[in-house]
Image (cartoon, grey):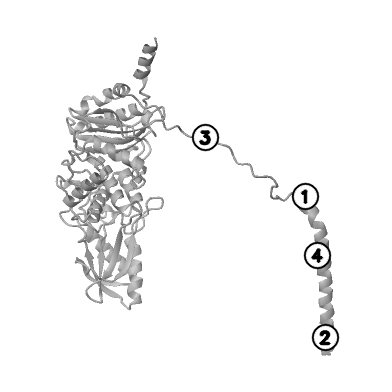
Amino acid sequence: MARRTRLAAVLTLAMINVFTLAAGITVARMLPPRLAALKVPTVASKPVTHAGQVLVPGSGSGELPTSGGLQAALAGPLSAGVLGPQVSAVVADPATGKILWSRNPYQPQTPASTTKLVTSAAVLAVLGPDATFTTRVVRGATENSVILVGGGDPTLAVHPFPSGQYPRPATLAGLAAATARALKARGRSTVSLGYDVTLYTGPGLAPGWPAAYVSTGNVTPIAALEVDQGRLTAAGVPEDDDDPYNLRARSTDPSGAAAEAFAALLTDDGIHVTGTPAAQQARPTAETLASVKSPPLSAIVQQMLEESNNVIAENLARQVALASHQPASYSGAAAAVTSELENLGISTSGLHLVDGSGLSPQDKIAPATLLRTLQLATTSARIRPLLAGLPVAGFSGTLSAGQSVFAGIGGPALGAVRAKTGNLDTVTALAGLAADKTGTTLIFAFMADKIPAAGMLRAAANAINDAAAALANCGCRLRALAAARTVGL
């Protein structure tokens, strides 16, 4: 019986092999004509032909406007009575730094938020565009204690921001989840919480800052640990939203608010927190349980410039101080930024800084200093992210609708001007790049810090806008061409 079974199996396998072989031969005979019908691509037998040139490279020798042409274009808007008696302005070629036209270019003026340009250049030069800032949780003095250590991340949030907002900040929620996992792995479920803000020193408000800056939503006291730049909801909790329209009073204790939010998050993650979070200094050798990193510095600088974020600016100035081994205070940051500008070859003649954001009316910067900062950003890859953060006239940041007193910018400036705005009660300034109607890129700085009355601020900003639009609309070689025609006659 077994012998018959084996024989049947052998015969069956033999028949399967015969059928398979026959099917293979049939398919092989059918395949060439079928493939030919499908016109399967084949490798070319001839050399591949490369595309020819589509666009001719620029000559790099575009016609620059003349001083006379610029005078004709700018004299009117920059002589507006609403700008007051002290107007300083300068226009230059970014490729060479050559000044093409100026009015009092070395006169120090109150710069307002155009100060953020020099702060940006200094921090990018010192740290590089890929730098990040770390917020950590370390072990405390006992097994059942942890300390939240502020690292000066000005973009730190409690929870993720709404989708679509950029850059995406590091969050206390993510840090709490990682901390809870580390504690549970060590068999800990109950801890006390401290918070360390000793990275920075000195007062929370800069010289010349009134307390109203906090109550009107301009800034929060500067600290190494804060969330949402101190912005609060109507309920008084961190906003978790990069909302430049939020002009509610900001937190007066941003570090304490961050620590309380972190304690609540730990509780949600299954870690019981005893008592109230208390300020304390972590040991230098304390074990790190968890950490989160900020977005790269290039993205932070762009965010800061586009929305003129004062809290970010002050934190970045402190980071320059830390990297330069200066005290991370207002005075230390001002000294460090000034020193780095000198290292970069930017003139600091007449420069006087007391903060990094320009909120203080005590700051002084000459238009020529802002101009050289912009010119360096066009030639230095390390500082170039500064340019990406400049608001675009009519489209983004403080040059777009409803974002600042410069929102009225229009006409030829739309899309052609990228610039940092600045204003205080009787101060207006604009510094950036403009593409004129011939396609030539120019750099400029317009400043007026003696506006006759605070009620004239918007009109003064519109006069500065008009100057920027005139620059964008300017071929500004008309006088030179007319002179050439006269000589030809």
Binning the other alpha carbons within 10 Å of mark 1 as few (below 14), some (14 to 19) or many (20 upward) gives few
| Between 128 and 264, the one nearer to me in the picture | 128
Q: Nearer the viewer, mark 1 or mark 2?
A: 1
Q: Mark on residue 37?
A: 1
Q: Secondary structure at mark 1?
A: helix
Q: Nearer the viewer, mark 2 or mark 3?
A: 3
CA separation in Å, label 3 and label 4:
55 Å
Nearer the N terminus, badge 1 or badge 4?
4
Q: Secondary structure at mark 2?
A: helix
Residue indicated by mark 3: 55
Nearer the N terminus, badge 3 or badge 4?
4
From the top left corner, tell me how far across and down residue 45 is, in percent: 70, 47
CA separation in Å, label 2 and label 4:
29 Å
From the top left corner, tell me how far across and down residue 173 is, in percent: 34, 63
Q: Secondary structure at mark 3?
A: loop
Q: Does 224 sit above or below residue 193?
A: above
Q: Mark on residue 5?
A: 2
* Residue 464 placement, left or right of 18: left
| Between 109 and 233, the one nearer to me in the picture | 109
Residue indicated by mark 4: 24
From the top left corner, tell me how far across and down residue 22 is, in percent: 84, 66
Residue sitting at x 84%, y 88%: 3
Quadrant hosting residue 399? top left
